Amino acid sequence: MSVRNEFYDLFVGTYTERLPHVDGQAPGIMRARWTGEGGPGEATLAAVLRNPSWVTIFKNVLYAVSETRSDNGEGDVSAYRIDEESHRLVLLGMQPSGGADPAHLAVSPDGRYLAVANYSGGSVALFALEEGAGRIGERLDVVRHEGSGTDPSRQEAPHPHMAAFDPQRQDLYVPDLGLDAVLVYRVDEGRLVPKGRIDCPARTGPRHLAFHPSGDVFFLVGELGNTLSTFRRSESGFVPVGSVPLLPQAERERGTESSAAAVRVHSSGTLVFASNRGHDSVSIFRYGNGDALELIGCVPTQGQQPRDIAFTPDEQHLLVAHQNSGSVAVFAVDAGAQGEKVLSYVRDYQVPTPVCLAWA
């Protein structure tokens, strides 16, 4: 990530049309300027694209899904060069995603591959990336998951919800909400080779994971179970070491309906944050010795349906994308504070149907 004229570009993935779970109001990928003074500037259109619900950036190239399905049953993935002068997005190309409703994508640490999780298609696709330019090349492989879970309304089929590369190895981790499992693949000469499967308790609904800075631990949020689980690397792969509820006991006893969305880890490795839709909050956990996770706070996010959460480049602020209230809220972060005082609400900014946050 590089500084341009002492500010950063914040790119926002959005929904652009009405779907069963959202009333999309955005025209495409949005962009705002962040100066580090407490908030982004006005959000403007960076690129017209249908339902760019997830975006990621690698070496000045932005990759985006189009969470759709065409007549051939596939969505799309696109690549854009971020112009250093105008800060606009220049389309490099688009490819069918390998399945319906792509929900997430990730670039391998060496920049050679793009992995895409197709939620409704129940598949994971692997693409070659053109060295230097970042263009999306040929689709090298597609793996279709098989099976179902115990929730007939949400787990009737596989639903890969994320693609995450191991920061230490050329392995791909795919949380599958429909299978209650994280499927693991080794990328070998452009092929996704099954390497293992990490099973979760029934109706966990694995959604997103985030690696600890050490690379030897990752944290997984379960959308259906509204839990945060810890996994540690062993000789045979990652193994579960514990799971905790995202909401305080009083809220659980009250029967508050909520579902997990995103998880982020502070660079100190001692704080883990997760967003809760329905309860409309961010849960703060202290991570310590023996892989212990302690819920130290649950802060209202001042909006509806918080989806992605993201630290600013200096980690002085945490941003929250509110899908249903059309806003991005800014919270000051004090990593040394106690309890809910770790986060302090600053203000919010209007962005239509924001669901993903990425920095350039």
Image: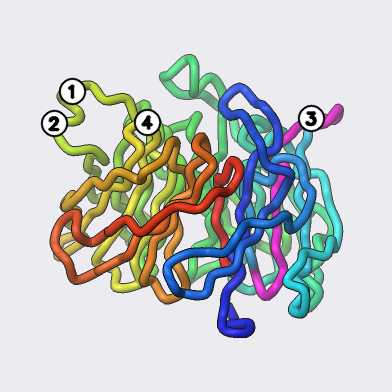
Task: Please state if 120 lies on the left or on the right of 168 as rendered.
Answer: right
Residue type highlighted by circle 3:
Gly
Pick the front one: 147 or 245 = 245
Earlier in the chain: of badge 3 and badge 1, it is: 3
**Residue mark closest to the camera, 3 vs 1:** 1
Earlier in the chain: of badge 4 and badge 3, it is: 3
On the image, the x and y values in percent for residue 207 come to: 46, 41
Q: How many marks?
A: 4
Check disc 3 and report the residue beneath it: 73
Q: CA distance from mark 1 to mark 2?
A: 6 Å
Check disc 4 and report the residue beneath it: 278
Residue drawn where x is 19% and y is 30% of the image: 251
Which quarter of the picture shows residue 238? bottom left
Check disc 2 and report the residue beneath it: 250
Residue 163 highlighted magenta (yes or no): no
Earlier in the chain: of badge 3 and badge 2, it is: 3
Residue 63 highlighted magenta (yes or no): yes
Q: Are marks 4 and 3 in contact (CB under 8 Å)?
A: no
Check disc 1 and report the residue beneath it: 254
Residue type highlighted by circle 4:
Gly
Dot 3: element: loop
Q: CA distance from mark 2 to mark 4?
A: 15 Å
Earlier in the chain: of badge 1 and badge 4, it is: 1
Dot 4: element: loop
On the image, the x and y values in percent for residue 34 come to: 54, 70
Q: Which residues are magenta?
A: 58-73
Residue 6 is tagged as none
